[in-house]
Amino acid sequence: MSELMALQRTAAIDALLLRLEVIEHLCGEDFPLYSPGLEDRWTVSRGGSWLGGFWAGLWWLRARVSGASADRHKAARISQRLTGKMAAPTINRSMIFWYGLAPGALWFDDVPCRLMLDQAGAALAISFSRTLGCIPLGRDMGGGPQGDQRIVIDTLAPALRLLDRHPLDSVRELAAQHLQGTLAACGTWRGAYCASVQYCQQRVVVQEQAGCWSRGQAWAMLGLAQAAGLYGQPFTDLAQRACDYWLETRREALPANHLQHPDAGDDPCAAVIAALAMLGLDSLPGQSMPWREHAEGLLAAVVHSQHVELGGATPGLFGGMRYRTGEGDVLVESACSSFFLLLALLVLDGRINALDC
């Protein structure tokens, strides 16, 4: 199994951190969304869409590593620019606000971030559907007219954390309900998870075969690892089962984007998120499986792949997230994939706890 030596981890972390300055220079005050492959050709947004929180999160990670007040202040300024998404009718708000604000609130006791987290949790709670037993996708940010009847797995981890840390009991109680409702709709006994399902005529309609979309399965693993950290059993067993399913169905370290279409390309970002979930499992007591070794193997494959530039003209560029753009389903560099790669490497390096955020 491949390893990442300490010097290799440090080199990758340093390159990802320095990359932020290059992206900022290219994008100015706009939020960077994605750039195709290794091209440095960024699509930007004034409001940040669902990716804006990851741009703030990247600067919080840099502040955590550097300890520099300039980095902390920059992260705080970007975080405050996320306010406009507070009322957006979509569960994707959880990604925006958890990853964009929680690092500032938890690591730096940033008061504005903490207050915004409280607001975001309360706003998200209003969207809870008693009919569905969870918070639906919603109509904004691509949800469409049927978004209020769709249940998705990708936001499980941030929605769970955002609700669970809220000061009001009534909001915190929704965290476990949302978790149970989402798992009931999207899960299977094998540990495979559907990325999304549709609620139609009082029954759940599966959109595609469970466990086939690699990043969807990785999102489920991450959400379950967070649930295990918060609540213990039975979610520890469920997280183990989901990770076992990943290992059984994805023999290659860089997984196919979709198991039913293996010739359509891989998705290194899915491997990164899966590795972070395994590191989360490894941090829990009583684990006998070599989750850390599996995670390190996945991260080593990503860092050593053609999708990551550590030298040359663009050090720190990670062009390894499968994303649907106007040019089709392509690999891009994004704030999301860079955030998770940097976070996973910092966890592997012992600088951050696996289930911190």
Image (cartoon, rainbow, N blue to C red):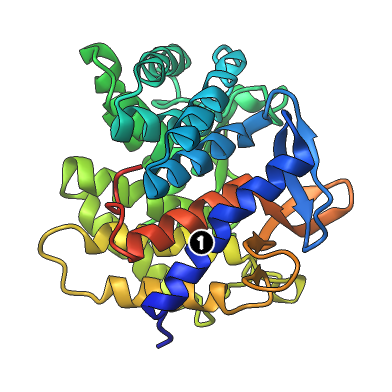
Residue occupying the point 30% across, 44% down: 356
Classify 346 as above or below 106.
below
Q: Nearer the viewer, residue 186 or 237?
A: 237
Side of 200 where 287 appears, left or right: left
Horizontal relation, residue 249 to residue 175: left or right: right
* Place of residue 220 in the rendered image (x, y in percent of width and height, measured from the top left): 43, 51
Residue at image point 83% right, 59% down: 39
Q: Where is residue 258, by image quadrant?
A: bottom right
**Amino acid at dot 1:** Asp
Secondary structure, mark 1, is helix
- Give the class, few, some or many, for how many residues have Cα within 10 Å of label 1's Cα (few <14, many ≥20): some
Closer to the camera in the image, 316 or 151: 316
Location of residue 85 (image quadrant) = top right
Q: Whole-percent x and y of residue 342?
A: 48, 56
Name the image quarter holding residue 170: top left
What residue is at 55 percent from the left and 73 percent from the top?
A: 303
* 169 up-or-down from 291: above or below: above
Residue 214 visible in the displayed image: no
User: Quadrant of the image for the N terminus?
Assistant: bottom left
Q: Residue furthest left?
A: 286
Tally of numbered tags: 1
Q: Which quadrant does the C terminus fall into? A: top left
Residue at 16% from the left image edge and 67% from the top image edge: 287
Q: Which residue is mark 1?
A: 14
Q: Position of residue 187 (x, y in %)?
A: 41, 50
The percent coordinates of residue 173 (x first, y second) are: 24, 21
Answer whether residue 238 is visible to the viewer in this image: yes
Relative to 37, is 260 on the left or the right?
left
